[in-house]
């Protein structure tokens, strides 16, 4: 293979060192919330956001007051975005059906899709107010039928962000808290004197939020590890450098540690894109952030073939993958590890982030190898059940179960089966032995 890196980001060792620092801070913070509850989250909110109200939960009148500050145009745009996201989520929900089948005469098996009973939806808002994250989490949970939806977002300039509050409320949140970062995630999962804990946490966030979710997993469910934004552009010479550079920097502006990677089989396009990135960073208003991400986490990878491009892309397993080639559907067919695909030059990651209808809470840090992104199905638990309706079925299945339990040495298990073989099949199975094979 002849894979060439024209630019590399931080090494895995350097990234791991950064993660270790974050891990220690988060662990201490969650322990503080566990020990001191409301006092801890108040101190953390004051420290990080300069915000310490009498109550972090918004009242109906406060929600209404915040929404009054949203312009008519902004409100219409939010409604449009929520309509797209709701429509796709409803279609996904319709694809998940309860089933009941009779696998043998008198043996009924089934499963039911049951909503998680409470969920905490985190909406980031530190550097940028992520209004769309409210649609992606709150609204999708609402479509799933979650009966208690809690949502938290940090204050912006010392107050609730009006558009975020509008999106949370319109999306279906039952409780809205003006609380940010790992303290919000910790409060929703652990609970405090004034916040009842939830069963599940969802939503993207910075490295501290993602690490808090990781440490809380098991105590509560989580959607996935959704850390700092990642983007990848897979491109050949069917597109130009301006398009590629724009798509890379469009995601690099998220934060100082947002990986942006381009994979191409055109050295000419790679060189031109590197030059175009330098040009755009001179005029991009968010260049202060984007330039640091590109400097520390940006990568330019040149491959000899499409097969090599595919192998590199699957190995990196990026959150967002923009594919702009002469064979986009080939990549759709063969890629197996990613967050979401954006196929062709007409669409882009920002569409997915804000409005098109697919969910933008996606796996990062190679988690796309084993999970997809947030969707309505993440809020549903599939629970199985069984029923036996005839004596004959109870005795038949029981006899098989008895012998298989004895094969493993589980005598108590076998007796659960044997008592039914005796009662419903009329067979006197000696205690602690496997049931005999039925005679034809």
Image (cartoon, helix red, strand yellow):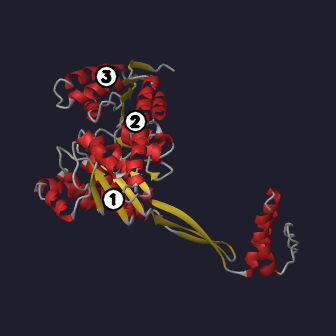
In this rendering, the answer to whether 302 lies above or below 139 is: above
Earlier residue among tags 2 and 3: 2
Q: Is residue 358 left or right of residue 432?
A: left
**Horizontal and vertical percent position of residue 246:** 25, 32
Quarter holding residue 242:
top left
Residue at figure coordinates x 84%, y 69% from the top left: 435
Q: Nearer the viewer, residue 175 or 142?
A: 175
> Mark 3 highlights which residue?
295
Residue at figure coordinates x 54%, y 69% from the top left: 99
Q: Secondary structure at mark 1?
A: loop
Q: Nearer the viewer, residue 73 or 416?
A: 416
Q: Is residue 235 visible?
A: no
**Horizontal and vertical percent position of residue 437:** 86, 69
Q: Nearer the viewer, residue 303 or 226?
A: 226
Q: Residues within 10 Å of mark 2 (few under 14, many from 20)?
A: some
Q: Residues within 10 Å of mark 3 (few under 14, many from 20)?
A: some
| Mark 2 in CB contact with mark 3 (< 8 angstroms) | no
Distance from Cα at disc 1 to Cα at disc 3: 43 Å
**Horizontal and vertical percent position of residue 227:** 38, 39
Q: Secondary structure at mark 3?
A: helix
The C terminus sits in image quarter: bottom right
Residue at figure coordinates x 79%, y 69% from the top left: 415
Q: Secondary structure at mark 2?
A: helix
Earlier residue among tags 1 and 2: 2
Q: Is residue 306 visible?
A: yes
**Horizontal and vertical percent position of residue 109:** 62, 70
| Mark 1 in CB contact with mark 2 (< 8 angstroms) | no
Q: Is residue 105 left or right of residue 7?
A: right
Using the image, tell me which numbered label, if any, was put on residue 25: 2
> Mark 1 highlights which residue?
194
In this rendering, the answer to whether 66 lies above or below 280 is: below
């Amino acid at each position: 293979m002849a894979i060439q890196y024209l630019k590399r980001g931080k090494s895995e060792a350097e990234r791991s060192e950064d993660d270790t620092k974050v891990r220690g801070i988060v662990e201490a913070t969650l322990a503080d919330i566990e020990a001191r509850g409301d006092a801890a989250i108040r101190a953390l909110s004051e420290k990080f956001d300069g915000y310490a109200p009498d109550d972090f939960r918004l009242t109906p009148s406060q929600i209404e007051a915040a929404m009054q500050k949203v312009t008519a145009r902004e409100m219409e745009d939010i409604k449009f975005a929520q309509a797209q996201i709701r429509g796709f989520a409803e279609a996904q929900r319709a694809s998940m059906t309860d089933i009941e089948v009779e696998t043998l005469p008198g043996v009924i098996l089934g499963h039911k899709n049951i909503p998680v009973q409470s969920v905490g939806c985190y909406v980031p808002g530190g550097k940028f107010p992520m209004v769309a994250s409210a649609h992606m989490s709150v609204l999708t949970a609402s479509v799933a039928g979650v009966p208690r939806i809690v949502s938290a977002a940090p204050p912006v300039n010392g107050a609730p962000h009006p558009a975020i509050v509008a999106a949370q409320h319109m999306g279906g949140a039952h409780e809205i808290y003006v609380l940010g970062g790992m303290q919000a995630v910790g409060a929703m999962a652990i609970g405090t004197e004034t916040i009842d804990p939830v069963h599940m946490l969802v939503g993207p966030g910075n490295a501290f939020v993602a690490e808090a979710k990781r440490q809380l997993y098991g105590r509560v469910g989580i959607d996935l590890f959704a850390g700092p934004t990642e983007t990848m552009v897979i491109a050949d010479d069917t597109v130009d450098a301006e398009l590629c550079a724009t798509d890379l920097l469009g995601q690099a502006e998220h934060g100082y540690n947002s990986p942006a990677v381009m994979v191409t089989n055109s050295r000419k396009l790679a060189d031109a894109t590197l030059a175009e990135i330098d040009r755009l960073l001179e005029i991009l208003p968010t260049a202060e952030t984007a330039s640091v991400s590109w400097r520390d986490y940006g990568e330019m990878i040149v491959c000899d073939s499409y097969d090599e491009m595919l192998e590199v892309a699957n190995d990196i397993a990026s959150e967002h993958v923009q594919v702009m080639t002469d064979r986009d559907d080939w990549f759709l067919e063969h890629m197996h590890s990613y967050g979401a695909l954006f196929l062709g030059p007409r669409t882009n990651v920002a569409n997915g982030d804000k409005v098109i209808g697919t969910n933008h809470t996606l796996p990062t840090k190679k988690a796309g190898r084993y999970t997809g992104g947030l969707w309505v199905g993440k809020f549903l638990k599939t629970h199985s059940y069984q029923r036996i309706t005839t004596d004959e079925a109870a005795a038949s299945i029981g006899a098989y179960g008895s012998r298989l339990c004895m094969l493993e040495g589980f005598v108590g298990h076998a007796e659960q089966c044997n008592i039914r073989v005796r009662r419903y099949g009329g067979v006197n199975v000696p205690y602690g032995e496997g049931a005999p094979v039925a005679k034809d």
